[in-house]
């Protein structure tokens, strides 16, 4: 992609050419190619009377590194060296990465990637050295995935920083990294990370194949790639998980999944993804398993509430009043006596208003965003009840539904549930509880049909695999999870910690060893 795909006729310059021995021709070519690019710097100097040229983009390189590691060495030791390609490269031995290229296309690509180019007269090679720099955001705590317990570091917009954060957690020679670039104009660097001895080779090939087929002008965020490579882009449900936590990426790599890291965004993609993976949080594995089990069931219950509670209220108050106790029915009827709208319109007014307040709270500055959303909900709800537009029970239902949607750890799944709430409400208004049942059947059928890079979306529940249910509705202790998920890992299914004994066995073995020692004495 990138420069190799320049259309003929759009640029009079032929970029598929070799570097000339005449440095003036090379400089003329680069200046013509980057016309009206004032941030491209051409720094000329001489080595033993021979003209040399440094080319780089201002703001993308560390100028101090160029000065101390390139210019100073070249100018102070020029008298004692013979001018050839190898000697010029040797003078830059303090720089971590020094390469050469003979192609102008590769030279331009390196310049745009933030590297520095050295051209020397009479040499038909360009010397490329890494002097990347500029202002970057430092490693900080991720804001979209707050954790009570666990690492506080999150990904940044620098690809190399992100890959290093993962490598610090997985110090294994089996951790592999494939690099490529996407985007005709952005030429965004991308890294595919996986554990060679765990991940399926077919999955790695499939991910690589889909990425290579991407043909787009620019890639500015991992969401571009997510939409282009997922199995079913028409589905409401996310089939690729995104995260800005290195520990989450490392944990998924250990299970045989693949991570895609993109330069310019702190969000990494994890492939493949299942529905159960999206309702799990990092604290599920850092807290004791009793707490994890409770929190998982709490999330499952509130996911059902977030999806079905408004629809149930509409169905019961419209068609199935006999399901309510008499006292509750009289209370609801009295509160709705002066309301001019049916239950569906009432619910839509409140739900849309609540979603608008939530969106406004996200877009406003953080110092006032939360206050505005909370106060807005209180004021609007109270005013609507007093004005007789909506009933008090409906305000309670919408409030509980909003709180329930906040318990979902992943935003992309939470927004899907929030969107599906509206079709459920319409079905409940048309057919009552039968409509909710029809919606549930259609939703379950869709989830069973869904795939994420060939992996069933509801695996291991559908299709059912009993020995893999230890980390779905519950989370068993670490010493009991002996195997990796078979539907994800392609090889080496047994975890490295399977030989660790349980606490009971440890106690028994220690007692036996002490008894044997006493008998020997």
Image (cartoon, helix red, strand yellow):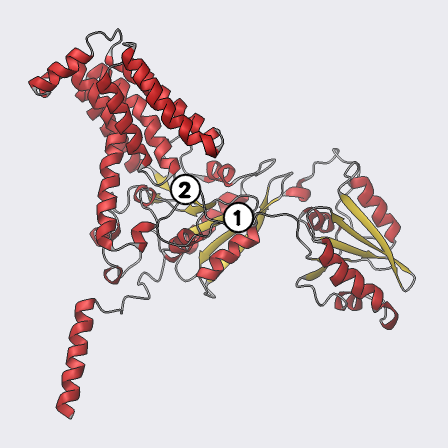
Name the residue carrying label 2: 240
Q: Is residue 234 above or below residue 203?
A: above
Give the left or right position of residue 34, taking residue 213 as reference.
Answer: right
Q: Is residue 94 above or below residue 402?
A: below
Q: Does residue 486 show up?
A: no
Q: Is residue 358 above or below residue 427?
A: below
Residue lying at the far bottom of the rendered structure = 521
Provide the secondary structure element on which disc 2 rests: loop
Name the residue carrying label 1: 156
What's the mark number on residue 250? none
Label 1 or label 2, whichever comes before in sequence order? 1
Residue 315 in percent (x, y) is at 19, 18
The answer to which quarter of the image holds residue 71 is: bottom right
Residue lying at the far right of the rendered structure = 49
Residue 444 in percent (x, y) is at 25, 33
Q: Residue at 25% of width from left, 50% of height from top?
A: 292
Label 1 to label 2, Cα distance in Å? 20 Å
Residue 412 in percent (x, y) is at 39, 36
Circle 1 or circle 2, nearest the eye: 1
Camera-side residue of 451 and 222: 222
Residue 87 in percent (x, y) is at 79, 69
Q: Does residue 517 show up?
A: yes
Camera-side residue of 1 and 349: 349
Q: Marks 2 and 1: in contact by CB < 8 Å?
A: no
Give the left or right position of residue 495, taking residue 80 as reference.
Answer: left
Provide the secondary structure element on which disc 1 rests: loop
Numbered marks: total: 2
Q: Residue at 26% of width from left, 51% of height from top?
A: 471
Q: Badge 1: few (under 14), some or many (20 or more) residues near its Cα, within 10 Å?
A: many
The answer to which quarter of the image holds residue 416 is: top left
Q: Residue at 32% of width from left, 14% of height from top?
A: 383
């Amino acid at each position: 992609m990138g420069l190799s795909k320049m259309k003929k006729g759009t640029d009079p310059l032929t970029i598929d050419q070799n570097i000339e021995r005449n440095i003036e021709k090379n400089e003329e070519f680069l200046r013509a190619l980057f016309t009206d690019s004032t941030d491209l710097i051409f720094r000329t100097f001489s080595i033993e009377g021979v003209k040399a040229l440094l080319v780089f983009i201002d703001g993308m390189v560390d100028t101090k590194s160029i000065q101390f590691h390139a210019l100073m060495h070249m100018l102070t030791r020029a008298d004692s060296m013979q001018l050839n390609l190898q000697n010029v490269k040797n003078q830059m031995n303090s720089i971590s990465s020094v390469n050469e290229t003979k192609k102008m296309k590769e030279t331009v690509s390196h310049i745009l990637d933030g590297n520095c180019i050295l051209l020397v007269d009479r040499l038909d090679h360009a010397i490329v050295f890494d002097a990347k720099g500029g202002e970057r955001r430092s490693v900080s705590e991720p804001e979209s995935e707050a954790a009570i317990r666990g690492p506080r570091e999150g990904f940044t917009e620098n690809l190399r920083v992100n890959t290093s954060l993962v490598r610090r957690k997985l110090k294994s020679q089996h951790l592999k990294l494939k690099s490529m670039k996407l985007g005709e104009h952005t030429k965004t660097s991308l890294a595919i990370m996986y554990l060679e001895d765990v991940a399926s080779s077919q999955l790695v090939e499939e991910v690589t194949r889909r990425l290579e087929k991407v043909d787009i002008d620019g890639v500015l965020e991992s969401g571009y790639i997510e939409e282009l490579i997922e199995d079913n882009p028409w589905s409401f449900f996310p089939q690729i998980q995104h995260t800005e936590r290195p520990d989450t990426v490392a944990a998924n790599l250990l299970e045989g999944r693949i991570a895609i890291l993109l330069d310019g965004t702190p969000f990494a993609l994890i492939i493949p993804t299942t529905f159960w993976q999206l309702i799990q949080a990092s604290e599920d594995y850092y807290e004791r398993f009793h707490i994890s089990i409770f929190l998982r069931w709490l999330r499952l219950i509130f996911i059902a509430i977030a999806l079905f509670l408004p629809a149930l209220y509409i169905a019961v108050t419209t068609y199935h009043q006999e399901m309510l106790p008499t006292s509750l029915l009289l209370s609801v009827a009295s509160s709705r006596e002066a309301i001019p709208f049916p239950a569906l319109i009432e619910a839509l007014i409140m739900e849309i208003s609540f979603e608008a307040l939530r969106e406004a709270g996200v877009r406003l500055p953080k110092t006032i965003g939360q206050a505005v959303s909370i106060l807005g909900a209180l004021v609007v709800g109270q005013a609507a009840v007093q004005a007789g537009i909506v009933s008090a029970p409906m305000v309670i239902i919408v409030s509980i539904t909003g709180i329930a949607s906040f318990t979902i750890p992943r935003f992309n799944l939470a927004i899907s549930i929030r969107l599906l709430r509206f079709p459920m409400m319409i079905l409940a208004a048309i057919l009552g509880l039968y409509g909710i049942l029809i919606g549930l059947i259609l939703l379950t059928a869709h989830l069973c049909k869904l795939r994420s890079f060939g992996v069933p979306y509801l695996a291991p529940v559908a299709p059912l695999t009993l020995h893999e249910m230890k980390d779905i509705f519950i989370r068993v202790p670490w010493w009991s999870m002996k195997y990796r998920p078979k539907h994800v890992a392609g090889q080496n299914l047994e975890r490295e910690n399977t030989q660790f004994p349980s606490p009971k066995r440890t106690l028994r073995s220690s007692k036996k060893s002490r008894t044997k020692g006493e008998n020997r004495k």
